[in-house]
């Protein structure tokens, strides 16, 4: 019994010491990592990762309760800068490594291949360079590999196909080149393949479209070529996102896409696809986003797309579509964004436009051949923030409820527009409007306001000073008169201000110097007078200035932005003077000596005048005193005689 107890005691002692040695190994590995971190602004690791406290209590460390070993390292988003030491490969029980969102650089050490328990590696959003390490394929339990947003280069290793348990492979936003390895098709548990924003070439391996577990295929912004297989969705029953935009893919859009019945996002923009929009897409009833922009598609927009009741974003711009817009589309209540601009669409918009789209936020239909009226019912789309119907042939009164430029709208802008307080962009340029409502100042969140090239007259409203969020105000080419309201000087966010080609008069407001964000200022072809405020030298971001064809006078400032402008900014202001590079007459310079002499002489004349007056006053007093004494003496003589 005693012998058995002794054996048990020795065994426990050895096991305890082995445990200590192992956790000591983990501690040494982590302290080595700490020593390779050259910058950590909050000094969290410097104070917390210390031998004076247990490793398992350190920030970012998780230990297993069974073996008392480090199983997870998470130091993501700590603004750490440094390199990864090879000692990290000694964390033999590590299953999760997350150092994302820092600025680590250099290579990933090959000693990480020792971490056979690793299931997750997340090093995204750092500055790692070099090729993707082939040793990663030696990690048999790896399920999640995130290497995105670094500076990895070279080719995607074919050996990654050895990671048979891999579920997510994210390599986007690097400098990877070459073809996509067909061996990736051997990853039978893969749910996400994200290779976007690289320099990959060649065609998409058909083997990828046979991975039945895939939820997302993201290959946008590469240099991929070729055609999509006609059976693209025969083996993708779980696909939810297909992102292929900004490549050089050609051929037709395969009707077989309808078999990806769980598809929610289909993005094929900026490729070389031809033909028509397959009507079969209307069977993708889970679709929320359909964007097929800037292709070579033609024909009519299928009316069956109106069956996509979950659709939130429908983008078909920059194609060659003809015919009218199907009325069924305007009854998709979930729609938030519609983009049909720059096609060859014709016909009219529905008379009840807006009633079936309560969630619509952006509607782009500019650059087509649409005609007819724009119904007031568009106001029912109460969430509408952007409306672009420019360059069409619309007629009639302007709707109450916004790019409506380059049409033939006339008359007054309705006052109810001032009630659309959610409006951010209002473009009414190039119409025949003659008055603006007084309550436009209520649009305090307006970012851009453009009413140029209309028939607007009268004074500029003081209420425009309420556009505190505005970055652009363009009132040019109208018939505004009177002075510029000083309230405009309070628009601190304003970047672009154009009041050119009006009949404005009076001085340039000195308060314009408070618009410190201003980059573009055009006041040409008005009747402004007075001097150019020297305070405008404070507009250090001003890149364009045009105050030509006015009646300004005095010296042109030379500091701040005036150091970079040319004579073109001051044309036809005959009373201006200043530096010869402005092609104006020199200013009259008064001699300093003459001025000083004149001041001295003036002072002397004043002193002489004062002295003369003082002398006369003294003389007058003396004269009176003498007369008084003489009269007194004569009275005394008379008394004595008497």
Image (spheres, rainbow, N blue to C red):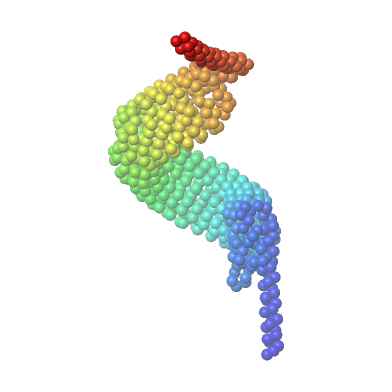
Q: Which one is nearer the viewer's eye here, 178 or 110?
A: 110
Left or right of 233, for residue 415: left
The residue at 48%/19% (across/down) is 552
The residue at 44%/44% (across/down) is 291
Q: Is residue 544 above or below residue 35?
A: above
Assign the C terminus to one quadrant of the image. top left
Mark yes or no: residue 395 visible: no
Assign the N terminus to one quadrant of the image. bottom right
The residue at 50%/44% (across/down) is 245
Where does residue 294 sit, x and y in percent of width and height?
Answer: 47, 38
Q: Quadrant of residue 187?
A: bottom right
Mark yes or no: residue 335 visible: yes
Q: Quadrant of residue 7?
A: bottom right
Q: Which one is nearer the viewer's eye here, 248 or 364?
A: 364
Where does residue 88 sit, x and y in percent of width and height?
Answer: 67, 60
The residue at 62%/52% (across/down) is 41
Where does residue 50 sit, x and y in percent of width and height?
Answer: 66, 63
Q: Quadrant of residue 403?
A: top left
């Amino acid at each position: 019994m005693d012998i058995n107890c002794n054996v048990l005691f020795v065994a426990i002692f050895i096991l305890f010491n082995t445990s200590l040695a192992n956790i000591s190994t983990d501690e040494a590995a982590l302290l080595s990592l700490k020593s390779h971190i050259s910058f950590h602004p909050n000094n969290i690791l410097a104070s917390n990762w210390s031998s004076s406290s247990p490793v398992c209590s350190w920030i970012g460390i998780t230990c297993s309760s069974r073996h008392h070993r480090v199983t997870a390292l998470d130091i993501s988003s700590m603004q750490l800068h440094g390199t990864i030491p090879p000692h990290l490969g000694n964390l033999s029980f590590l299953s999760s490594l997350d150092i994302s969102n820092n600025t680590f650089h250099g290579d990933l050490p090959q000693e990480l291949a020792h971490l056979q328990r690793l299931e997750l590696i997340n090093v995204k959003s750092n500055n790692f360079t070099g090729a993707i390490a082939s040793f990663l394929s030696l990690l048999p339990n790896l399920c999640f590999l995130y290497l995105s947003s670094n500076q990895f280069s070279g080719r995607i290793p074919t050996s990654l196909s050895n990671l048979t348990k891999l579920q997510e492979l994210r390599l986007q936003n690097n400098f990877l080149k070459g073809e996509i390895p067909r061996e990736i098709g051997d990853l039978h548990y893969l749910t996400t393949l994200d290779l976007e924003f690289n320099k990959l070439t060649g065609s998409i391996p058909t083997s990828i479209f046979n991975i039945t577990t895939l939820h997302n295929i993201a290959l946008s912004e590469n240099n991929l070529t070729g055609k999509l297989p006609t059976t693209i969705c025969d083996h993708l029953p779980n696909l939810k996102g297909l992102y292929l935009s900004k490549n050089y893919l050609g051929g037709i859009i395969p009707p077989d896409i309808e078999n990806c019945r769980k598809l929610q996002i289909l993005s094929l923009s900026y490729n070389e696809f031809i033909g028509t929009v397959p009507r079969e897409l209307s069977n993708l009833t889970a679709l929320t986003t359909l964007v097929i922009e800037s292709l070579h598609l033609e024909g009519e927009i299928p009316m069956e797309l109106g069956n996509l009741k979950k659709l939130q974003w429908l983008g078909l711009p920059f194609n060659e579509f003809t015919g009218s817009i199907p009325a069924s589309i305007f009854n998709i209540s979930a729609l938030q964004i519609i983009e049909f601009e720059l096609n060859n669409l014709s016909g009219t918009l529905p008379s009840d436009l807006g009633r079936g789209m309560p969630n619509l936020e952006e509607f782009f239909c500019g650059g087509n051949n649409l005609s007819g009226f724009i119904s007031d019912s568009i106001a029912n789309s109460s969430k509408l923030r952007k409306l672009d119907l420019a360059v069409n042939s619309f007629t009639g009164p302007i709707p109450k409820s916004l790019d409506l430029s380059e049409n033939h709208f006339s008359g007054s802008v309705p006052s109810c527009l001032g009630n659309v307080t959610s409006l951010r962009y209002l473009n009414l340029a190039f119409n025949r409007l003659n008055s603006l409502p007084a309550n436009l100042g209520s649009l305090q969140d307006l970012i851009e306001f453009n009413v140029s090239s209309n028939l607007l007259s009268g004074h500029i409203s003081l209420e425009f000073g309420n556009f505190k969020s505005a970055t652009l105000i363009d009132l040019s080419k109208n018939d505004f008169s009177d002075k510029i309201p000083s309230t405009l000087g309070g628009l601190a966010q304003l970047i672009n201000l154009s009041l050119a080609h009006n009949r404005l008069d009076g001085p340039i407001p000195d308060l314009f110097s408070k618009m410190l964000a201003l980059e573009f200022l055009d006041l040409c072809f008005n009747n402004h007078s007075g001097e150019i405020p020297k305070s405008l030298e404070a507009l250090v971001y001003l890149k364009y200035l045009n105050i030509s064809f006015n009646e300004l006078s005095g010296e042109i400032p030379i500091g701040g932005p005036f150091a970079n402008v040319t004579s073109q900014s001051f044309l036809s202001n005959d009373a201006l003077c200043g530096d010869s590079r402005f092609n104006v007459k020199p200013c009259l310079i008064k001699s300093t000596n003459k001025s000083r002499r004149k001041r001295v002489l003036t002072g002397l004349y004043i002193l002489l005048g004062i002295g003369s007056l003082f002398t006369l006053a003294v003389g007058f007093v003396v004269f009176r005193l003498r007369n008084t004494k003489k009269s007194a003496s004569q009275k005394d003589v008379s008394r004595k005689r008497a």
